[in-house]
Amino acid sequence: MSIRSLKTCIPSAALALLISTAASAAQPGLYLGADMSAVNQVQNCGGVYRDHGKPVDPFELIARKGGNLVRVRIWVHPDGKYSTLEDAMKTARRAKQAGMKVLLDFHYADTWADGDKQPVPKAWEKLGYQGQIDALYAYTRNVLGKFAAAGLMPDMVQVGNEINPEMLGAFVGKPIDWRRDSRIINAGIRAVKDAGRAAGKTPLIMLHVAQPENIIPWFTAATKAGVTSYDLIGISYYKKWSTETVPQLGATIAEAERRFHKGVIVVETAYPYTEDDYGHASLLLGPDTLIPGYPATPEGQLKYLTDLTQTVVDNGGIGVVWWEPAWITTRCRPPDVTGSPWENATWFDYRNGNEALPAFDFLGRKYRPR
């Protein structure tokens, strides 16, 4: 998307930040990167990444290959020491030291919040409806205040992760009470803006929904309910769990931009480089995972990435983020990273000492609207 066309879909204050953020990108106006939330844990557990046989810092490798955005999740009070405030800040610091921007992904849960479930944090369970809204606002402001004080204010913030179900306690299949959900979402948005004003830097705000077939209905309902003060639409796209093809995803991106006048990013996607399971119960396996023309090979994975990114660009989208390309297997015992169920969808070849795969090359390609 050109800077000129961006002016029609993003408010002026957010636009200024988006332009300045994109200016340092390998390709101006396009965000390419990865969710690197597992790296600290993997490396603490002895995991080693390699490029041409030599150990490599995966953040530096992504940046060197042309990446410009790192996504990192944060949980409220998780068991263990990962996806905490401190761990998320460490990831953000590593990303910024490598010269990349940061997207902070608030899950608003103590563990995974996703398109199937939005569990309420244990400490918020008995607070009641208004108490939970107040807690979410205070928590968001506090986290961002600490990031800002450390010189790590994110460039983008997700108010929730795959918020298809109603936030704070709902599961997929339960109808959304938009009077309730809109107040929760807007409290998070308000907290980001208030924290940004206090810090002198307001992150772009993303709302994130899983699978493109849900985008138009969800954002139409959200808009009707008064959820409008955000900058970006985030989409998860995994063919295994989606009814849409890659071209249909492109059409959804174009329609979302036309209807809602927001920047659109495919903020989660992945594809296997092998159908081998390695005994780790890989999630991206089976015929429903693969797309004709994209075999589960290193070359097929790269082709998927480059074709998907071109489709995003052709339809006015402004970014692609791979989910957990560095979540490799380690020798730690649970609950730390052991056998990774994402092993066959990383960017490091388990069969070859976690050697960097060709997938990295998509970061340096030049993508132009056809």
Image (cartoon, rainbow, N blue to C red):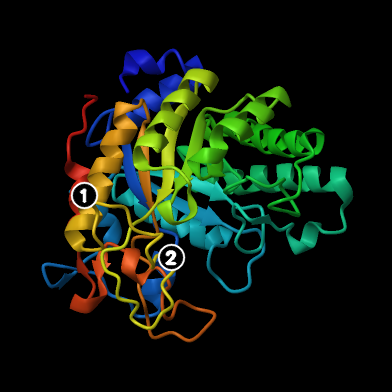
Q: Is any atom of residue 350 visible in this view? A: yes
Please give the name of the residue rendered at 30% of the width and 70% of the height, measured from the top-left corner. Answer: 275
Q: Quadrant of residue 198?
A: top right
Please give the name of the residue rendered at 23% of the width and 44% of the height, measured from the top-left corner. Answer: 306
Viewer-side residue, 130 vs 366: 366
Question: Badge 2 local density, few (<14 within 10 Å), some, or many (20+)?
Answer: many
Residue identified by numbered label 1: 303
Report whether 357 appears left or right of 343.
left
Residue identified by numbered label 2: 38
Q: Is any atom of residue 206 visible in this view? A: no
Mark seen at residue 370: none
If you read the primary sequence from the N terminus, does the residue marked by circle 2 or circle 1 appear first?
2
Q: Amino acid at mark 2?
A: Ala
Residue 364 position, x and y percent, is 18, 43
Look at the numbered disc 1 and give the secondary structure of its residue: helix
Q: CA distance from mark 2 to mark 1?
A: 25 Å
Looking at the image, residue 43 lies above or below residue 67: below
Viewer-side residue, 337 vs 323: 323
Residue 230 position, x and y percent, is 58, 28
Please give the name of the residue rendered at 21% of the width and 66% of the height, measured from the top-left corner. Answer: 56
Look at the numbered disc 2 and give the secondary structure of its residue: loop
Q: Quadrant of residue 58?
A: bottom left
Viewer-side residue, 116 vs 291: 291
Please give the name of the residue rendered at 18% of the width and 76% of the height, measured from the top-left corner. Answer: 352
Looking at the image, residue 304 lies above or below residue 353: above
